[in-house]
Amino acid sequence: MALLEARDCALSFGGLRAVSGFGLSVDAGELIGLIGPNGAGKTTVFNLLTGVYVPDSGDIRFGDRSITGMAPHQINRCGIARTFQGIRLFPNLTAFENVMAACEHRSDLSMVGTVARSPGAEAERRRIEAECLALLDAVDLADRRDTPARSLPYGLQRRLEIARALATKPKLLLLDEPAAGTNPREKIELMEKIRWLRDDFGLAILIIEHDMKLIMEICERITVLDHGEVIAVGCPAEIKSDPKVIEAYLGEPE
Amino acid sequence: MPSLVRANAALLIGVALMWPLGAALPAVLNAYYLQIIVYIGINIILAVSLNLINGVTGQFSLGHAGFMAIGAYASAAVTMFAWPSGLPGGLWAALLAGGAAAAVAGLIIGIPTLRLRGDYLAIATLGFGEIIRVVIVNTESVGGARGLFGIPSLASFASVYACALICVVLLWRLVYSPKGIPLAAIREDEMAAAAMGIDTTRLKILAFMTGSFWAGVAGGLFAHFIGYIHTNSFTFLKSIEIVTMVVLGGMGSFSGAILAAIALTVLPELLRFGAEYRMIIYSILLIVMMLTRPRGLLGNREITTWLSSKLATAR
C-alpha cells in the first residue's frame, strides 16, 4: 500500500485553476522528484499535501487514513514534514531552539512538571535536548547550536530547516527546492545528505527542484507538472525522453 | 517529593526570606518608599505576565488591566464575603480565586480570537477591558461606581514579593523549556510553527490564560494592599502602561520587563517636582528611549546572556 496517495485533487483561486486532476503516489522509503516549469503549481501541491490549502475536490490519503481537510499541525503529526521554498525558520531563535520547537507535540512534558522541575520532567527535558543535539549533528550544525537562525549563512539555514522538519519524526519529508541558492559544491553535499537521510531515517522523500541534474541523479521516480496538471510520471530516463516534458521545458518545435 | 523540594530549594528559601525582609524594611524606609516598592512588585508581576503574551508568544493584548480588575474584585469578594474571618490563609485562597477568575475570562476571550491570526486579539481585549469596567460600575454588590471599601489589608511587602518571585521564576522556567520554546516559535512564524506540528491555537490560549492568571493575582495583591478598589485603577491607560513596560524592556525579555516595571513605577514619582509638566517629561523620556533603543532596553535578550557575552569578550 502506498504511504501517500493523492487522487484527482483540484484547487482554484477564484477563477484561476492552480491544480487540477493531480495524482501522486509515494511508497515508504521512496525518493521522488516533482518538477515543472515556473508557475506549474509545484509549491501549491506541497501546500495541498500539508494542509495549508484544502483541495476543492479529490482525496489525499496518508497510510490508512484520509488527511484531506486536516489542519497543518494535525497532518504533521500524522507523519508529513516539510521545508519551505523561501526558508521559514524561526529567525530570532537559536539553531538549537528551532529544532526544539518542533519536538513539542511528541513530548509528554507537562506544564506543571516543567515549572516545578519535577524529576520526570527534567529527565524528559534532557532527553529532548539530547535528541535535538543529535539532529543538529546529523546535518553538521552542532557547532552552531547557539547561533540565531537569522545569522546563519544561507546554505546552513537550509540544512537547519531539514533538521527542524526531522525533529517532528516524519515518515514522509517534503523538500521545497532544497538546493536553491546553494553553490555547486554544496549541491553535491546536499545530494549525498538527502540520500543518507532517506536511508538513515527510513524516510520517503518528495523533492521539488529546478536543478535537473540533481533530480535526475537522486530520484527513483519523477512526476512532471505543467499548468497544474501532471504531464508525465516515470523514471529519470523516461522523463528525459518524454516529448511532452521536452515541450513544456523547451517550448514547441517550430 | 524530596527531590521536588531539592529542585525548588532556592526558590522556597527566596520566598521565605521575603518575610524577615518585609519585617526589617519599615525600620529603614518610610511608608511612602515602602508603598512605591510594593507597587513595583505588583507591576513586575503585571509586566512579566504580559510579556509572556505579548513579548514571547507575540499576541498583542491590550486588556491586561481588565484581567487585573477581575482578579482584584474576585479576590476581594472571597476575603470579604466567603472566607471565614479568623481562618488563616485567606489571602492565598483569594489570590488563587482571583487568578483563576482572570484565567477563565482569558479562556472566554481567547477561544474565539486566538484561532485567528493578526490583530483580532488586540481589538477584542481592548473592548473587553471596557466591558469589565462598565459591568463592575453597574454591579452594586461590589460597590458599583463608589468602589469597593473595607477590603482587609492582608497583602504586604512580603506577600507581594513572594508572588513576584514565584511568578518570575515559574514563567522563566516555562519560557526557556521545551514547553515554552514553541510559544516563541509562534511569534516568529505562525505558519511554520503549525507545519512543525505545533497546535498554535491551543498554545496561544494556554499562554494567554497563564498571563491572565498572573494579572488576576496582581490585581488581588493590589486590592488587599490598599484596601479600596475602584474601576479608575483599571482603565485602558493602565493596560497601556503595562504594554509600555513590555515594549520598553524589550519584547520577550524577562529582565527587560522587570527593569522597565521598576523604571516606569519610579519615574512618575521622581518627576513630581515638575508638577503639571510631569506627564510631558514622562512622554518625552519614552520617545527618546524609543528613538535611541527601538528594540527596547534589552532587545529580546536577557541580562544574563548580555553579561556572559560581555565577560566572554573581556576575557
Image: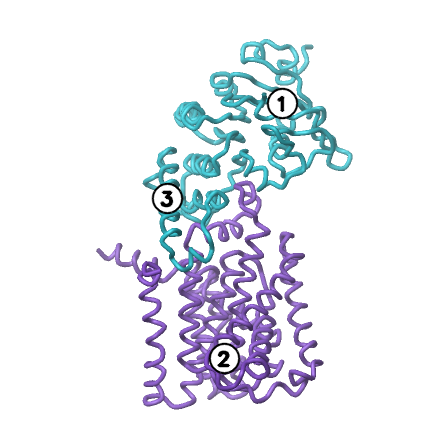
Q: Nearer the viewer, residue B281 or B5?
A: B5
Q: Residues within 10 Å of mark 1 (few under 14, many from 20)?
A: some
Q: Marks 2/3: CA distance?
A: 41 Å
CB under 8 Å between callouts 2 and 3? no
Circle 3 sits in a helix, a strand or a loop, which is it? helix
1 and 3 marks on the same chain: yes
Circle 2 sits in a helix, a strand or a loop, which is it? helix
Q: Nearer the viewer, residue A154 or B200?
A: B200
The numbered dot on residue A24 is: 1
Residue A68 placement (x, y as % from top left): 66, 34
Q: Colour of chain A?
A: cyan
Residue A8 drawn above or below residue A82: above
Q: Residues within 10 Å of mark 2 (few under 14, many from 20)?
A: many
Tell which circle, 1 or 3, labels the residue nearer the N-terminal end: 1
The numbered dot on residue A212 is: none
Residue B114 placement (x, y as % from top left): 62, 55
Q: Which residue is mark 2?
A: B90
Residue B117 placement (x, y as % from top left): 63, 52
CB under 8 Å between callouts 1 and 3? no
Q: Chain of mark 2?
A: B
Q: Residues within 10 Å of mark 3 (few under 14, many from 20)?
A: few
Q: Quadrant of the C terminus of chain B?
A: bottom left
Query: Of all residues shown, which one is farthest toward the left?
Result: B315
Q: Chain of mark 1?
A: A
Q: Chain of mark 3?
A: A
Residue B202 placement (x, y as % from top left): 58, 52
Query: Of all residues shown, which one is farthest toward the right?
Result: A15
Circle 1 sits in a helix, a strand or a loop, which is it? strand
> In the image, what residue type sits under mark 3?
Arg
Residue A65 drawn above or below residue B189: above
> In the image, what residue type sits under mark 1?
Leu
The numbered dot on residue A127 is: 3
